[in-house]
Amino acid sequence: MKGVIFNLLEDFITDGWGEQAYEEIFAQCPLQTKEAFVGLNSYPDADLLTIVAKAAAQFDISVSDAVRAFGKYCLPKLVAKYPIFVAGHRHPKTFLMSIDNVIHVEVRKLLKDAEPPRMFFVDPAPDQLILRYVSKRQLCPLVSGLLDGTAEYFRTPIGHTQTQCTQSGASACEFHLTFENEVGAFA
């Protein structure tokens, strides 16, 4: 996993609970990485999950809830860092459908060893979308949080229900999304 995600996790914890809380959590984590996390470098996925698990235990929330809250936190931070990826999108549906074919393609070009998830879409109706998330990391709660953040960013409620999960043996995680406003029908 890229260091930028670790940097966002540190910001998430320090913004929510303070720098001292992050330092205490970090000190308790048996990490494979011994140096500071640097944005473009790659680090073991296990290190991220270890920090999240310690933070969840510290704040008495489930790991799934912590990962979802982190995903929601990440979206506006990533948009601020990479505004080009939302430029031209006025609705979350068109933005979401660009993730795999635009954003993840660019990530793979810029960061040769990057392994972003794959996202596939079925577009059954103007106010609906089916998202299929495929990743060895199995971070479907992160996807839920990113969807929450996307809804807030675009000021368009997104109802989403996870109907399949790789953690339960499915080949992909599947989310059924509904949008309050259809593409092109802005409030």
Image (cartoon, helix red, strand yellow):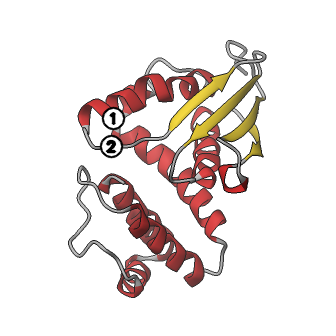
Q: Secondary structure at mark 2?
A: loop
Q: Which mark is residue 114?
A: 2
177 with respect to 105 (left or right)? right
Where residue 88 appears, x then y in whole percent? 47, 17
Against 186, residue 179 (above or below) is below
Answer with mark 2 or mark 1, whichever residue precedes in sequence: 1
Can you tell which quarter of the image residue 173 is in? top right
In front of the other: 29 or 182: 29
Of the 4 image quadrants, the one containing the N terminus is: bottom left
Nearer the observer, 19 or 161: 161
Q: Quadrant of the C terminus?
A: top right
Crowding near the residue tagged with mark 2, few <14, some 14–19, many ≥20 C-alpha atoms within 10 Å = some
* Residue 173 drawn above or below residue 63: above
Q: Are circles 2 and 1 on residues that touch, CB within 8 Å?
A: yes
Mark 1 lies on a secondary structure that is helix
Q: Quadrant of residue 155?
A: top right
**Foreground tag (2 vs 1):** 2
Residue at 46% over, 22% down: 101
Query: Which dot marks residue 70?
Result: none
Indicate the amino acid at tag 2: Ala
Q: Is residue 146 left or right of residue 103?
A: right
Q: Nearer the viewer, residue 18 or 158?
A: 158
Residue 107 — which label?
1
Residue at (37, 80) in percent of width and height: 26
Query: Looking at the image, which residue is at 58% across and 82% down?
Result: 57
